[in-house]
Amino acid sequence: MQEVSIMVFSRKEIVLVSFILVAVLIRLFPHPPNVAPITAVALFAGTFFDKKHWAILMPLIAMTFTDLFLGFSMITPVVYLSFIAITVIGMVFKKMNFGMVILSSMVFFVLTNLGVWALYYPLTPEGLITCFTLAIPFFINSILGDLFFSVSLLFGYRFAAQRLQLA
């Protein structure tokens, strides 16, 4: 009788998933508004997962899992869409650097605030300006959190990959 072994994840992917799990759990701890690891997770997944379906699924699974505890809202579909877009940025550019993190933060800011404007503000130029102006403090927090978590994921993964001799 022949033994059949089905490996869902490679060694590299197991390490990637473990870093994502830690980042996701951090989202459940109290934190300042928009200082969260999910943008970094989306960029990280897009950059390092060889299988595109896993890259796209990781941030969505992370958000769904944590949103079960933190709650869903009317803006949730737009938030999830923004993380898909950020994952695609990672898949296309295959880089996690300062520019890619800032681009990811901007994509999240623009897409989610367009959603907030469409759902909660008058659909006028004044409503758009008000929405984006009031969101600036959250954008600053997002950039700080995205930079911190991106650096943590990138250097943590590089260290682990070197120690474990991952391809």
Image: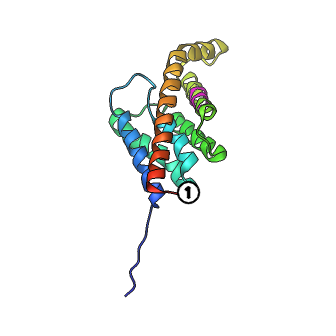
Q: Which residue is mark 1?
A: 51
Q: How many marks?
A: 1
Q: Nearer the viewer, residue 68 or 55?
A: 55
Dot 1 alpha-carbon crowd within 10 angstroms: few under 14, some 14 to 19, many 20 or more: few
Q: Can the viewer see residue 106 in this picture?
A: yes
Q: Is residue 106 magenta?
A: yes
Q: Position of residue 14 (x, y in %)?
A: 42, 55
Residue 3 versus residue 151 in the image, above or below:
below
Is residue 41 highlighted in magenta?
A: no
Write the residue at 62% across / 19% down.
123
Query: In the figure, 150 relative to 30: above or below?
Result: below
Quadrant of the image occupied by residue 104: top right
Tell me, what colour scheme is on the image?
A: rainbow
For badge 1, the amino acid type reads: Lys
Q: Residue furthest bottom?
A: 1
Q: Where's residue 21, x and y in %?
A: 39, 45
**Which quarter shows the N terminus?**
bottom left
Q: Vertical placement of 163 versus 144: above or below?
A: below
26 relative position to 99: left or right: left
Residue in the picture at 67% in, 14% down? 125
> Which x, y percent locates residue 62?
42, 43
Q: For the C terminus, which image quadrant?
A: bottom right
Residue 154 lies, in percent from the top left, at 51, 41
Residue 16 visible in the picture: no
Question: In this view of the protein, which residue sits in the foreground, 142 or 68?
Answer: 142
- Choose top left, top right, bottom left or bottom right for residue 101: top right
- The residue segment tinted magenta is 104-110
95, 120: nearer the viewer: 95
Seen at 60% across and 36% down, the residue is 97
Q: Residue at x 37, y 25 (%)?
A: 31
Q: From the viewer's side, name the closer residue of 95 and 58.
A: 95
